[in-house]
Image (cartoon, rainbow, N blue to C red):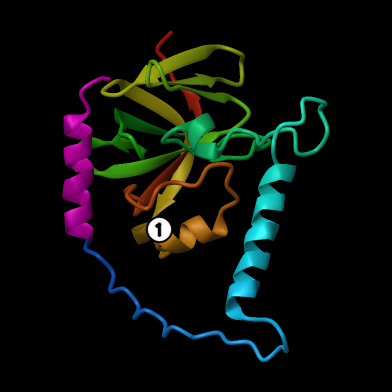
């Protein structure tokens, strides 16, 4: 594992500055009873358990390729800390330059002036390598480039911020179609949709 202490510290500082929204009060608990004749609460519990066991059994691998032959990998296993959206028909041509930070839960860009932007990646051209903790992006011209924590990068694409659009991070997440949703710990006051990695070559 590479040392991500700086990236984690940046996230912690950002989180402390952004503050925590007040949490709503816990809903009142409701006691459920049954008036069905001959059925006790214990009987209902046994019935629920039997249904759960049956559901697990039908979800076990069959080895025959039929439905229920095993669950697919979860977004966390496939994408790690990346925020990922479905493929799009094109990319914006703006440019963001800064230091790439990769933590266990988030990938973001630190630009000049300590501005932080959560990075959003296209599903069809992005690969996450958990062993190398590296992101590989295929550009539209077919070239690829791998990036790791601490790399200086120039990312073509586009984005916005709360200041520009008036849309909060929570609203932005709710409005966006995701393949892998960003963690709530990510700095979402600014967000950047990555289209290409720009090189000097």
Residue labelled with disc 1:
169
Residue at 50% x, 47% y: name it: 181
Q: Which of these two is toward me, 22 or 46?
A: 46
Give the image location of residue 163, x and y in percent.
Answer: 34, 60
- Place residue 103 in its image quadrant: top left
Magenta part of the chain: 1-18
- Place residue 89 in its image quadrant: top right
Left or right of 167 on screen, residue 187: left
Q: Which of these two is toward me, 158 or 17?
A: 17
Say which quadrant the C terminus sits in. top left
Q: How many marks?
A: 1
In reply to whether residue 78 is colored magenta, the answer given is no
Say which quadrant the N terminus sits in. top left
Q: Which of these two is toward me, 51 or 181?
A: 51
Residue at 34% x, 43% y: name it: 117
Give the image location of residue 122, x and y in percent.
Answer: 57, 33
Left or right of 5 on screen, residue 93: right
Q: Residue lying farthest front? A: 38
* Magenta residues, dominant SS class: helix
In reply to whether residue 9 is colored magenta, the answer given is yes
**Disc 1, SS:** helix
Residue at 77% x, 25% y: name it: 63
Left or right of 194 on screen, residue 16: left
Residue at 63% x, 66% y: name it: 46
């Amino acid at each position: 594992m590479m040392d991500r202490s700086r990236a984690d510290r940046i996230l912690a500082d950002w989180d402390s500055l952004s503050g925590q929204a007040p949490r709503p009060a816990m809903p009142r608990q409701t006691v459920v009873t049954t008036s069905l004749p001959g059925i006790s609460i214990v009987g209902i519990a046994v019935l629920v358990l039997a249904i759960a066991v049956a559901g697990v059994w039908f979800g076990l691998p069959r080895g025959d390729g039929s439905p229920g032959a095993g669950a697919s990998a979860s977004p966390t296993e496939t994408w790690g800390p990346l925020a990922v959206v479905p493929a799009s028909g094109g990319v914006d041509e703006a440019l963001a330059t800064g230091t790439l930070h990769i933590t266990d839960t988030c990938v973001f860009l630190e630009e000049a002036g300590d501005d932080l932007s959560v990075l959003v990646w296209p599903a069809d051209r992005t690969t996450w390598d958990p062993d190398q903790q590296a992101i590989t992006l295929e550009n539209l011209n077919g070239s690829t480039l791998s990036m790791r924590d601490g790399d200086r990068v120039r990312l073509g694409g586009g984005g916005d911020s709360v200041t520009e659009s008036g849309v909060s991070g929570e609203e932005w997440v709710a409005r966006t179609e995701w393949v892998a949703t960003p963690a709530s710990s990510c700095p979402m006051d600014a967000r950047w949709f990555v289209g290409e990695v720009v090189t000097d070559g």
